[in-house]
Structures are given as C-alpha cells and as structure tokens.
Image: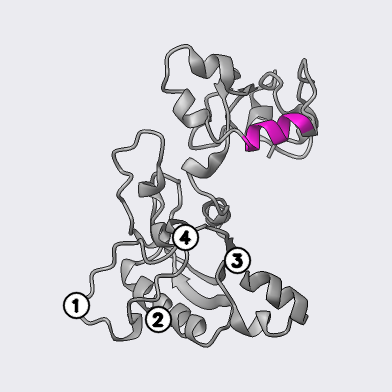
C-alpha cells in the first residue's frame, strides 16, 4: 500500500523500489491527497458510467496518477498513468476480496446492501429450488456465483466475484431465514473453502473462518428500545 502522503505521485526512480519495501523512496505528488479528494472519489458513483461517455469522463470524474507495485512475477517497472477514479461499488462493495487476496483466514464481513432477505422461500426445505442470487443482497450472493444478471453491463463487474462454492449458498440462506423468523440479527458464522479466482488474483485452496453480518429487521432488538422509539419506527 502507498501511504496517503505519496498517493498521486510519480513512480519510484529506482526499479527495486517499485516492488515495495520498508524504505522505498517516493516522490511527493504535485497536489497532496487530502480528505476532500478522498470523499470526492468515494462518492463518485457516477464515475463508471461517465467513463464510457466520450469527453464526459475526463471532465466530471476525479483523476489521479497511479503506478503498479511490481513483483518477481511481474518485475518490469511502469511509469505512473492518469486514471479516472470513483466509487468502487461496481467492482465489490465489502472489501472481502481484498482480504482474500492477502490470504486472510479470519474475516468479519459487514454487508450493508439495500436488498432485504426474501422470506417467501423456505431455504431449509428447498429441494429442487434454483437460486437466482436475488434472495438477498447481491453483495452476498455474488460471492457464491449467483446473480449474474449484470454480466452484460460494461460498468459492473460483480459477475467475477465468486470465491466460495455455490453449494454453500443455500445452507447459509437457511441459517439466515431461521434468524429472520426468530427476529434476530442476520449474523452467521461459517468456515468456507476459498475458490481460485484468476480475475481477482486469488489463488484459493485454503479455508477462511468468516462472520457475515447483513442488514435486516431485528424484532428482538427493536423490542429492547424505548417505547417512544418503537412508536417512531412503526410510523
């Protein structure tokens, strides 16, 4: 990772420094990377679509100079290039895949998607049921290879996000449905085998202990709230 004070600067002058290390010498960028720029980039949900419109992307989208960190597999240094940047939600919203790139073995994944759990299906007794991935937030279902309806959208790349076996999806949906019916928070713990994903550079072949926490209505929590708060929620 490049520290924020060096983000946006030119590539290291020394070939070895582009591979990283504790004492890599970097040039200061012409414009410091400040909080306002970071907020502007992370809020640019329009960036992906704008980048496909001739002339508009370069005018509206935040831009920054970036260079790749080389490695023994890809040792050739490269100069910094100017990129349009924006909200990364068209790639992956949770940060889980970046952790798996680093071979994390214990992860807490907070999935704050707006799509609620579809409680119309009994996932615990779903013989013959074919999941679509729309049973819950696609931020969750994509990880198991479901909800590929955006495969033809050149601005969305969720179709490449599978890192767990598809057959692990319904058992987890069963546990989430049980929690939903009991009025409890949608939080499940699982040990899953990481699958190879060349698009993200994830080798696969190890297991990760993961806690998924998804947004959802929790009746047991709401029952503990003050009466006036419960009344306000019911309006």
Looking at the rendered image, the disc whose residue lies closer to the viewer, 4 or 2, is 4
Q: Position of residue 108 (x, y in %)?
A: 61, 67
Q: Earlier in the sequence, mark 4 or mark 2?
A: 4
User: Is any atom of residue 78 visible in this view?
Assistant: no
Position of 57 relative to 40 (above/below): above
Does the magenta portion include 38?
yes
Which quadrant is home to the C terminus? bottom right
Taking the spot 71% from the left edge, 36% from the top edge, the residue there is 39
Taking the spot 36% from the left edge, 33% from the top edge, the residue there is 154
Q: CA distance from mark 4 to mark 1?
A: 24 Å
Q: Residues within 10 Å of mark 3 (few under 14, many from 20)?
A: some
User: Is any atom of residue 235 visible in this view?
Assistant: yes
The residue under label 4 is 115
Provide the major secondary structure of the magenta segment.
helix
Which quadrant is home to the N terminus? top right
Looking at the rendered image, the disc whose residue lies closer to the viewer, 4 or 1, is 4
Are the residues at dot 4 and dot 1 in contact (C-beta closer than 8 Å)? no
Q: CA distance from mark 2 to mark 3?
A: 21 Å
The magenta stretch is 36-43
Viewer-closest of 129 and 27: 129
In the rendered structure, the answer to whether residue 166 lies left or right of residue 100 reads left
Query: Which label was assigned to residue 174?
Result: 2
Q: CA distance from mark 2 to mark 1?
A: 15 Å
Are the residues at dot 4 and dot 3 in contact (C-beta closer than 8 Å)? no
Q: Earlier in the sequence, mark 2 or mark 3?
A: 3
The residue under label 1 is 128
Q: Secondary structure at mark 4?
A: loop
């Amino acid at each position: 990772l490049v520290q924020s004070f060096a983000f946006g600067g030119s590539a290291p002058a020394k070939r070895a420094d582009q591979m990283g290390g504790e004492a890599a010498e970097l040039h200061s960028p012409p414009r410091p990377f400040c909080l306002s720029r970071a907020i502007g980039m992370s809020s640019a949900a329009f960036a992906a679509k704008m980048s496909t419109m001739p002339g508009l992307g370069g005018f509206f989208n935040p831009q920054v100079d970036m260079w790749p960190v080389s490695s023994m597999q890809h040792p050739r240094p490269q100069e910094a290039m100017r990129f349009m940047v924006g909200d990364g939600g068209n790639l992956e919203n949770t940060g889980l895949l970046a952790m798996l790139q680093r071979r994390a073995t214990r992860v807490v994944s907070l999935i704050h998607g707006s799509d609620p759990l579809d409680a119309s299906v009994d996932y615990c007794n779903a013989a013959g049921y074919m999941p679509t991935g729309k049973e819950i937030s696609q931020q969750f279902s994509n990880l198991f290879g479901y909800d590929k309806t955006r495969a033809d959208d050149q601005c969305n790349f969720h179709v490449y996000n599978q890192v767990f076996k598809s057959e692990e999806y319904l058992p987890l949906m069963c546990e989430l449905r049980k929690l939903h019916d009991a009025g409890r928070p949608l939080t499940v713990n699982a040990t899953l085998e990481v699958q190879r994903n060349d698009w993200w550079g994830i080798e696969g072949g190890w297991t990760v202990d993961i806690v998924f926490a998804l947004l959802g209505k929790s009746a047991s929590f709401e029952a503990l709230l003050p009466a006036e708060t419960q009344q306000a929620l019911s309006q």
